[in-house]
Image: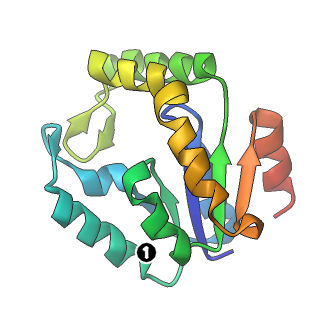
């Protein structure tokens, strides 16, 4: 595995898994949030974001952490493994709330110049992800070569997957 896509809801554990895989496989992480967001929580223009993302896809090896469902079909041909972290909404919500509260005190950032914190629009996005966005993700993954796709449901599945590397 040299090119790995990690997808799933915010709060599902994509970044944590990306970091673990990066350590084990010695591959760089491409954070889609870093390509999408400009300082001050400003969206990068779509064409510029896609160009940066496709440039990253063409690199020799990477772990791509991010949820851009609109661009997923275009990234799949570059990947040799696609990991879908499918955990319950309550788990994701708990993690994003914990991260938001922690960000208020730590000043941590989800992208350069973009502090973690309370953001109701983001909470709503995570709350509705399972009903609105997950079905789209599943349809796209169903068209991908199935030998590329791994679905991990929960911490034990993630730990077992990591143990096999």
Q: Which residue is mark 1?
A: 57
Q: Residues within 10 Å of mark 1 (few under 14, many from 20)?
A: many
Q: Position of residue 129 (x, y in %)?
A: 48, 29
**Quadrant of the image containing the C terminus:** bottom right
Q: Position of residue 82 (x, y in %)?
A: 63, 61
In the displayed structure, does residue 10 sit left or right of residue 105? right
Compare residues 102 and 131 and report the one nearer the observer: 131
Compare residues 8 and 134 and report the one nearer the observer: 134
Question: In which quarter of the view is residue 31 placed?
Answer: bottom left
Q: Is residue 19 visible?
A: no
Q: Residue at x 55, y 16 (%)?
A: 94
Q: Position of residue 5 (x, y in %)?
A: 56, 61
Q: Is residue 81 above or below residue 106?
A: below
Q: Is residue 64 above or below residue 160?
A: below
Q: Is residue 153 visible?
A: yes
**Quadrant of the image containing the N terminus:** bottom right
Question: In which quarter of the view is residue 52 placed?
Answer: bottom left
Q: Residue at x 31, y 37 (%)?
A: 109
In the displayed structure, does residue 66 sit left or right of residue 150? left
Please state the total of marks drawn on the protein image: 1
């Amino acid at each position: 595995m040299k090119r790995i896509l990690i997808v799933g809801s915010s709060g599902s554990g994509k970044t944590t898994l990306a970091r673990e895989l990066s350590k084990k496989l010695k591959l760089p992480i491409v954070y889609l949030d870093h390509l999408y967001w400009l300082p001050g929580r400003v969206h990068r223009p779509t064409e510029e974001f896609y160009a940066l993302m496709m440039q990253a896809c063409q690199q020799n090896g990477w772990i791509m952490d991010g949820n851009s469902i609109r661009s997923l079909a275009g990234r799949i041909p570059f990947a040799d493994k696609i990991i879908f972290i499918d955990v319950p909404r309550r788990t994701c919500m708990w993690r994003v709330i914990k991260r938001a509260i922690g960000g208020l005190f730590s000043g941590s950032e989800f992208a350069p110049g973009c502090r973690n914190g309370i953001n109701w629009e983001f909470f709503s996005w995570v709350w509705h992800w399972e009903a609105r966005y997950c079905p789209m993700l599943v349809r796209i993954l169903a068209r991908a070569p199935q030998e590329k796709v791994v679905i991990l449901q929960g911490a034990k599945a993630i730990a077992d997957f990591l143990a096999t590397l």
